[in-house]
Image (cartoon, grey):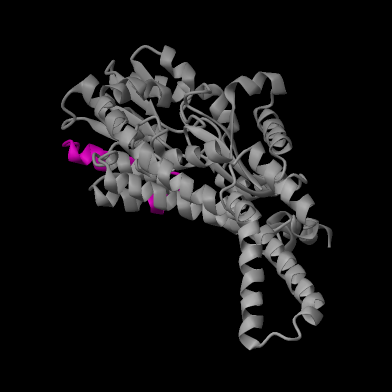
Amino acid sequence: MRICHIGMNHKSTPLELRERLAVPADRITETLHALLAHEPIREAALLSTCNRVEITLVTHNPEEAIAVAHRWFAAKAGIELDAILPHLYAHTTEDAVLHLFRVASGLDSLVLGEPQILGQVKASYEHALAAESAGHILHRLYQSTFSAAKRARSETSIGRQSVNVSSCAVELAKSIFGDLNDKTIMLLGAGEMAELAARHLFANGCKNIMVANRTLARAETLAAEFSGHAMTMKSLPDFLDAADVVISSTSATNYVLMPDMINQALDKRGGDPMLLLDIAVPRDIDPRIDRIDGAYLFDVDDLQQVVDGNRSQREQESLVALELLKEESAHFLHWLKSLESVPLIRAIQQITDTARHEELARAQHYLKGFDAEQLKAVERFSQSLTKRLLHPTMSALKHLPEDIEGDMLMGAAHILFGTKSCKLGLQASKEHPRDKIHARTTG
């Protein structure tokens, strides 16, 4: 079995395309089941954040599995396959595992070392568990991923300074306004990103915080923590003009701020400008607002200028963290390869041991004059000879390279020892998520 990792991120894909590919949490199970409906795909997980959409697959046919994922990305974006391919990357086994480890550790993030991505990777694993699309291999892969990320963060200073997209948005507001003490901040959304932004704002002296959310109860909970004012989205037009800075991070699939709303707010402000920071994907704020005089709009890709200013020290630590991740990746890959070689090794041992006993039985009439000690010596000799003859084969199977050479060695061993019946290994002995879902939908 092979692991494939197919996706796109902030480095490969513009924001306009990323927001079309984003998968809402309530559609992830449906997406995973659709992927598992394809024969080459045995297990699947999906990660969708503001800066990336990535699919992790377990498959016996990497080329076909990657092709399935490519077609899914094209269909989701609503464009031709040839148009989406330049924005996608695809990794198999060693590269796939290391890439997932890097993502979970924050080494592949817009903000190098940001800690929120680990929680998002954990959420993607939990979605796969809930969808029953994660089997034995993905279970082990994600446990190894969390362990690798923890080690990278604890043994290096890659995540020592709390940095994330929300904090960069606050830094950008400070760079424009300077002191935020007398500024009124409007948070659109009351989720994790909004809470992080509120904490950074409060720490930087901002005491005037308003929270607008689809449900009032969640807005009130967040606003109360910072002595702020809560409202529903429906009330937003009545209070928008009071905001000097708007930071938006809702999970809405359509724009929540339109040009007419900003024009009305600016008229009430009597010419005072507004800073709008859209850190949601899909975007919350209509990009046409950036053309309005007095409105200054920045999205997640615009935050790159803030990120670059804090990156150099983290890049040094990321090199140290990467070496740790490579060690953890090697441990997982050794386990993965053992899933294929261990059943084969056991089968060969059983075949050769059976043959050894059969030959000893045939030789019994030559051993009639042997006493008990001599018979034990013959038994030990037969065991030692068999072990010595098998040693090169067993050593090679225990240390198979994770490439075409390893597959060829496995295939040769199956043919030479006549062990075709155990070739499926884990597949033959364990039900896979795809089979379970297929049985449920057809039964």
Residue 208: in magenta span = yes
Residue at the (37%, 38%) spot, across then down: 323
Q: State the extent of the magenta-drawn residues as a range.
A: 199-218
Q: Is 346 in front, or is 66?
A: 346
**Where, by quadrant of the figure, is residue 297 drawn?**
top left
Is 309 in front, or is 201? 309
Residue at 56% across / 46% down in the picture? 25
- Relative horizontal placement of residue 364, taking residue 49 as reference (left or right): right
- The answer to whether residue 80 is above or below residue 21 is above
Q: Is residue 183 above or below residue 14?
A: below
Query: Could you tell me which quadrant the C terminus lies in?
Result: bottom right
Residue at the (69%, 85%) spot, across then down: 370
Residue 200, visible in the rendered structure: yes
Asked if residue 16 is among those painted magenta in the image, a careful observer would answer no
Identify which residue, 324 or 237, lies in the foreground.
324
Tell me residue 394's x, y (percent).
61, 55
Q: Return the x and y of residue 231 as percentages of the image width and height.
A: 37, 44
Position of 304 with respect to 260 (left or right) is: left
- Quadrant in which residue 277 is drawn: top left
In the image, residue 29 lies at what x, y percent? 64, 50
User: What residue occupies the far front of the structure in this picture?
Assistant: 369
Horizontally, residue 103 falls left or right of residue 336, namely left
